[in-house]
Image (tube, helix red, strand yellow):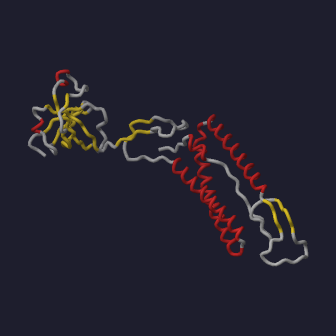
């Protein structure tokens, strides 16, 4: 089955930006403006004292700007997708690339956290742990999206109906393909109440269809209804439709797939065999 994206999935695929660390004797863990510098060049200070203070109010602005940029990129991409449905596969590839990037970011963030724990302050460790958790959540979200982007068949069988074409948008819950396992088919026949007592589960049944007039398919009685009913309307003659009958299910091996749903068939129950 081909990979398709639902509109709900499109809304979840967002852009992001990676951050970098600036290394030096004094490491700035998060971006922010410098508020106070307590030491000058040549002055000494003890370990674990903070020679520089910086404020983090600029962080929220940067994050908001990054979110705006990501939202604009997503809007632009979805508009292009609407104009060109062929870009669906490219969208799938982009989502896969984002997943791989997020996975790598988790490893990078974890490595940074391990390095900080070796000689970092509690504040630096807390910031790094928050970054690791954020990366993990992003990875989990992308993993969930990847599962939604790949549709698999629930069983092996013959495609009976295809209701969507490549490039079309699929609504949540919509049926894309109808698949049937035709390796064994079931034929329902209707036996008059006057003769139902001669039918037993396991009896052999000889079945013929108009499509293959020279071929007989072997089946067995699998189930007999407990209650009688009037003959269904799809039976050919009006006289037969007013009779009381019992529904009997016949299982027929169909390894070559010759029998198809909807084929009219005639069945002869072989008495004295099971």
Residue 240 placement: quadrant: top left
Seen from the viewer's position, the closer of residues 204 and 14 is 14
Instruction: Check the image and name the residue furthest to the top.
Output: 238
From what the image shows, is residue 264 above or below residue 147? above
Q: Where is residue 14 drawn, in percent x and y?
A: 64, 48
Q: Where is residue 179 drawn, in percent x and y?
A: 39, 41
Marker count (numbered): 0
- In-image side of 194 versus 62 (left or right): left
From what the image shows, is residue 35 above or below residue 118? above
Name which residue lies at 17% across and 21% down: 239
Q: Where is residue 95 drawn, in percent x and y?
A: 60, 49
Name which residue lies at 61% across and 40% down: 87
Q: Where is residue 155 drawn, in percent x and y?
A: 38, 47
Name which residue lies at 28% across and 32% down: 263
Residue 85 placement: quadrant: top right
Seen from the viewer's position, the closer of residues 178 and 121 is 121
């Amino acid at each position: 089955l081909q990979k398709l994206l639902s509109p709900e999935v499109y809304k979840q695929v967002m852009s992001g930006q990676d951050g970098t660390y600036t290394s030096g004797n004094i490491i700035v863990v998060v971006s922010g403006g410098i508020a106070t510098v307590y030491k000058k060049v040549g002055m000494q200070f003890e370990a674990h004292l903070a020679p520089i203070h910086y404020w983090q109010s600029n962080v929220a602005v940067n994050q908001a700007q990054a979110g705006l940029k990501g939202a604009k990129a997503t809007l632009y991409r979805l508009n292009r997708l609407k104009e060109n449905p062929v870009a669906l596969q490219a969208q799938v590839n982009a989502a896969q690339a984002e997943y791989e990037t997020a996975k790598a970011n988790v490893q990078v963030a974890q490595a940074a956290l391990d390095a900080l724990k070796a000689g970092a302050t509690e504040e630096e460790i807390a910031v790094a742990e928050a970054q690791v958790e954020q990366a993990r959540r992003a990875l989990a979200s992308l993993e969930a999206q990847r599962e939604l982007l790949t549709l698999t068949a629930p069983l092996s069988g013959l495609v009976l109906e295809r209701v969507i074409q490549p490039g079309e948008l699929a609504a949540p819950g919509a049926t894309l393909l109808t698949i049937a396992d035709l390796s064994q088919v079931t034929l329902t026949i209707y036996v008059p109440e006057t003769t139902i007592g001669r039918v037993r589960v396991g009896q052999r049944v000889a079945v013929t269809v108009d499509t293959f007039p020279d071929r007989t398919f072997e089946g067995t009685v699998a189930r007999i209804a407990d209650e009688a009913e009037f003959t269904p309307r799809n039976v050919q003659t009006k006289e037969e439709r007013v009779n009381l009958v019992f529904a009997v299910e016949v299982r027929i091996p169909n390894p070559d797939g010759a029998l198809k749903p909807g084929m009219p068939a005639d069945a002869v129950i072989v008495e004295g065999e099971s």
